[in-house]
Amino acid sequence: MTASAPIPSSDPTERQPRAYGDELHGRGCPIAHGAGDEVVIVGHAEALAAATDAEAFSSAVSRFLQIPNGLDGEEHAAFRRLLDRYLALEVVDGYADEFLAAARSTITELVTDETVTVDAVAQLGATYAVRSMLAWLGWPVSMEQRLIDWVIANNEATRSGELERTAAVAEEFDAIIRDALAESPADSVTRRLVRDESLGRPLESAEVISILRNWTGGDLSSMAYCIGVILAALVEIPALQDRLREWEYVSDAEFVAIMDEILRRDSPFVSNRRITTGPVSVGGAELPAGQSVRIHWTAANRDPRRFGEPDAYDPEANAAQNLVWGAGPHACPGKDLSMLELRAFIDELLAVVTVTAADTAAGERETHPVGGWASLPVTLTRR
Ligand code: HEM
């Protein structure tokens, strides 16, 4: 790599994502050499520039089929047109009652006493994520335990970094998807996708599996981790619980603004990879063609040059610069669905309980490549 300015070395795999970014920001470094020959972008302006210039920063980084994540240009745009229709707000809104039911059953089963201590991520988050996703995709409820076990195995395999383990969980997931395809009803999202011919041809089965893998993978782990980060913020700022409990007066726009700002401070969806298509300048350095790049959302969302004190909670000031859901052509198409699921869960939870820090045990932070909390014990006290 040629560099017009010296690029410091800092391996993200050795640190918790938030601490990693904070340390580089403290040294005034918007980019760094990461693991292997990768360049990590942590500066907000630089991450935004890379994410929005999809011609210079290609998403074709994997040898596996990844729809739409790994596609570029017109091929990517065509798949996004197809997929965005399933994830449009007016479409996913039709599942609001099912998400409420999923939230109610998750909370009722866990809040068995006046006061209980539960894990916000593994118990509340993962159970709710799986139940609401089953409802959305029309998969049989009998798959719940298998999916919960998969989420746990997947997180452990990702953390281990061992190729054999990640390959085994990937294979198990494809088997889950094949069983779900066979068992979902004809009018379900899953079966509609199988019948979809809006590209002018039916989707190949490898394409259907790839799309479902990206939807479910995105939904399950990210949703569980988001719930961990959100409950940590509700414990830290109890006034937020009071405000959100006035749900009839909290518009969807206000709810989204609150969630976006909570997640900006501690974004659990950490990073995505790119590869440069030609020489390009980033953060004062010249990168050659074929350079592996990692856009570090968690770090960029805490860049003090953009946000001042990164932990200050200020939804209004920070909304426009929020990168929790990415930016540019690959920006998350699942945001509306995620917010609908989060709203059902948070409204239901706060109607039933007050959330406080558990005095039994401290939480444990996640490590690269996942952010947020690995586990977060919280005490739920019935209201
Ligand atoms: C729950 C919290 C979630 C967070 C924080 C999140 C975050 C993100 C981010 C940052 C990206 C940008 C990736 C890139 O630029 O390479 C992305 C892309 C994507 N997300 Fe999400 N996501 C979430 C949930 C979901 C859900 C529920 C779905 C679908 C059911 C979903 C589906 C996708 C897909 C398909 C892409 C790839 C888009 C493309 O390449 O055009 N996500 N997400």
Image: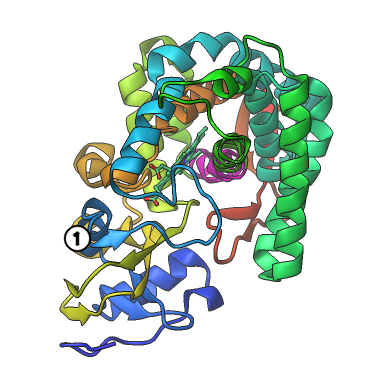
User: The C terminus is located in which quarter?
Assistant: top right
Indicate whether residue 254 is drawn in magenta: no
Residue stretch rendered in magenta on the structure: 221-235
Give the quarter the ligand 1 occupies.
Answer: top left
Identify the residue position indicated by label 1 in the image: 45
**Which residue is rendered at x = 45% and y = 70% of the image?**
19
The vertical placement of 110 against 249, above or below, is below
Task: Tell me: 196 left or right of 139.
Answer: left
**Which residue is rendered at x = 53% and y = 57% of the image?**
371
The vertical placement of 72 against 39, above or below, is above
Q: How is the image coloured?
A: rainbow
- Find residue 206 and report its horizontal and vertical position in percent: 61, 41
**Amino acid type for the residue under numbered disc 1:** Ala
Residue 113 can be seen, yes or no = no
User: The N terminus is located in which quarter?
Assistant: bottom left
Of the pair 227 and 54, the residue shown nearer to us:
54
Q: Is mark 1 within 8 Å of ligand 1?
A: no
Of the pair 282 and 116, the residue shown nearer to us:
282
- Among the 4 quarters of the image, the one containing residue 174: top right
- Find residue 169 and report its horizontal and vertical position in percent: 75, 54
Of the pair 216 and 337, the residue shown nearer to us:
216
Of the pair 54 and 227, the residue shown nearer to us:
54
- Find residue 38 and report its horizontal and vertical position in percent: 41, 77
Task: Tell me: 159 left or right of 140.
Answer: left
